[in-house]
Image: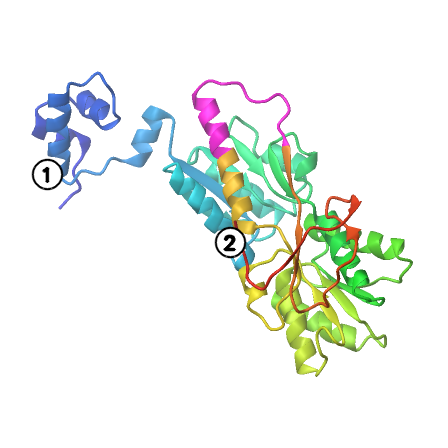
Amino acid sequence: MKPATIRDVARHAQVSVASVSRALNGSDTVTEETRKRILESAEALQYVPHSGARSLSTSKTNTLGIILPDLYGEFFSELIRGMDLAAREHSYHLIVSSSHDDADGAAAAIRSMRGRVDGLFVLSPQIDSANLATAMAGRLPVVLMHGGAGESTLPSIVVDNNGGAHAAVDHLLATGCRSIAHIAGPAGNLEAEARLAGYLEAMAEAGLEPHVVEGDFNQGSGHESAQALMKAGRRFDGVFCGNDMMAIGALLAFQEAGVRCPEDIAVVGFDDVPIAALVRPGLTTLRIRIAETGRRALQRLISQIQAAHAGRASDPVPTCEVVRPELVLRSSTRAAASTTRAADGRPSALKASAQGENQDG
């Protein structure tokens, strides 16, 4: 049986197509008696309004587009979870697409979303802000999240990657580590580069020689990089990993080689994905409250959309919201009750959470 159309509902309720449209869209120009008859007819015929046709008449799709570098891994799962919670609160649906960590792929995904969504969230650490702005030219509300988003004129949420990395090294120094390696994220990734820069700055300030091994933000590359460190001909007593998944891979490699953590080598990650609290030893890391960051990003995007439909002017200078990482102490490092550098770069007692369970806000 063919699905019922709006014309079928109008015929069944003995009203015009325009009256059906107005009733279903909540217009107050339809009498309650007519509205009731139309709704009863729609239910009897099991009519489902066509979202595309409705969006043409209302200029709203109640759908938001999400462009991520990848859809695999705990970080992106947590981010989407937070976004979905915020979207549901406002009766929005999500369309999620991957750029496959490629600039051309991200631009193509963005173009494919236009006309289908009311707003767009883009996390693409491989594209600079200028290219993103060009790809998203038009009036579509946008929120950015990536390493260079703070330089953009578009609304953005950024993580203080440099400050977080500096705090990670400072913590290792405070526990007595003096030979600290860094397993970095992939070259060309703006967030990986910012975390590498923070590591190098902290090591230079401490007068220590840096040692960097490039990874790829996944567990396998962390495992391989840790093996490379053990073959480097130099004994390391600490390692800062560019994200938690590489840190977990490194922990496994050390365990396989009989290297004790934290007695022989201390390990710090970045992000605080849920599994960081579950591995043994529990992973000391820099928490950015991933789900809450996703929720906040969607709330900002929805606020833009609502302002646009209400005819309210946007702020002349869109703000860049900075997420300050928080050091979470677990058993992969020795406890240290000392003064270090906060993730925002100010010399102070770093706010640290010494707990074994993950919290996502």
- Residue corresponding to mark 2: 78
- Region in magenta: 301-319
- Which sits in the foreground, 347 or 201? 347
Distance (Cα) linking label 1 and label 2:
41 Å
Rendered image coloring scheme: rainbow
Please tell me whether mark 1 or mark 2 is closer to you in this view: 2
| Mark 2: amino acid | Glu
Name the residue: 91% across, 58% down: 207
Note whether 313 is above or below 306 in the view shown: above
Q: Is residue 337 visible?
A: yes
User: Horizontally, is 40 left or right of 286 in the view?
Assistant: left
Residue 65 image point, x, y percent: 47, 40
Query: Which residue is depicted at the point 73% across and 68% down?
Result: 334
Residue that badge 1 annotates: 44
N-terminal label among 1 and 2? 1
Q: Quadrant of residue 171?
A: bottom right
Residue 346's x, y, as percent?
78, 43
